Image (cartoon, rainbow, N blue to C red):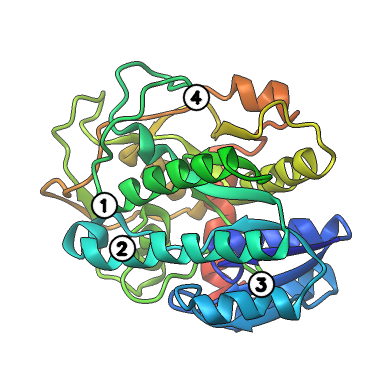
Amino acid sequence: MKILVTGGTGYIGSHTVVELQQEGLDVVIVDNLSNSTKDVIYGIEKITGTRPVLEVFDLCDINLTRQLFQKHPDIRAVVHFAAYKSVGESVKEPLRYYHNNILSSINLLKGMMDSGVDHLVFSSSCTVYGQPDKLPVTEEAPLKRPESPYGNTKKVMEDIISDTVSSSGLKAILLRYFNPIGAHESAEIGESPTGIPDNLVPYITQTAIGKRDHLRVFGDDYDTPDGTPIRDYIHVVDLAKAHVVALKRLVDKKNKKDCEVFNLGTGRGYSVLEAIKAFEKVSGGKLNYKIVDRRPGDIVKVWADTKLANRELGWKSGKGLEVMMRTAWNWELKLAGKF
């Protein structure tokens, strides 16, 4: 069975490609390499022994998207990651985010419909909940206006996919995941954003290795025990495995609805300062960080209720915060030639 993975050289995408290939599935990746490099392919090959097919182009081009499905007529399902993903950047450049994330997804759906590909696993986000009224947040929680244009593109795409499912033979699973961190145990692949990191952990590791002078902690006056925002951090490999399970659920026709939604997290929240302390423990060093003003688009606290995913998918996250930090640090050391 051949699977198309959009954004497959990216952080979560590359780890999912590894898990798919280790299940014996053939993978075609499409990526425009806007926030990744071709070198990721070699890391995937080192882990799995198989080099996935890589098609480099932008899904915003409808003609190239349709040609992709014509070139690979045996694609049976799609795992869709491709999107810009920086909360802060989306606040500054909303039109760029709406154009890229929504148009590319619509083109992908058109290509799938034209080619009769009717299984889709979509990379959504807990940002669709905004700041939840109750915690932990369940899949039944009302969707609020997200705090950032990035989050809103995920909400809009959920609506588009749901509407497409209702009007066609498409079957979809929307995975709302919380905060993926860490790297593969082999340190062959990990999170390596181009430019200044927007996510916490790569900024932590780059500061610790000396690439950054200091880590900025955005606000210490939130309504949390230590004043810093709380997130549900999940190991990227645990997250990747959930995509494989979701894909098999669709292909094996075990889904209970044509469009299903699942939260993917650990069910526990950690503050930014707790994450920093966990990193200091596994790395054995002190991190240089400074408290700065709040960042637009950030919510106060969120963590998942994962009972539905645990029950229906038979999936559960297994790696703790220190393992997440250790693997992220090993990846940074590997990039520096020190691992």
Residue shown at the point (81%, 45%) measured from the top left:
251
**Which residue in the protein does label 1 denote?**
149
**Does residue 197 sit above or below 124 in this rendering?**
below
Cα distance between the residues tagged 4 and 1: 21 Å
Which circle's residue, 1 or 2, is located before the other in the chain? 2
Cα distance between the residues tagged 3 and 1: 26 Å
Residue shown at the point (77%, 57%) measured from the top left:
20
Cα distance between the residues tagged 2 and 4: 25 Å
Q: Is residue 89 left or right of 265 when viewed as pictured?
A: left
Residue 84 at least partly seen: no
C-beta proximity under 8 Å, tags 1 and 2: yes
C-beta proximity under 8 Å, tags 2 and 3: no
Residue most extreme to the left: 293
- Mark 3: give few (<14), some (14-19) or many (20+) Cα within 10 Å: many
Can you tell which quarter of the image residue 91 is in? bottom left
C-beta proximity under 8 Å, tags 3 and 1: no
**Which residue in the protein does label 3 denote?**
29
**Which residue in the protein does label 4 denote?**
139
**Can you say which quadrant of the picture contains the C terminus?**
bottom right
Please tell me whether mark 3 sits on a helix, a strand or a loop: strand
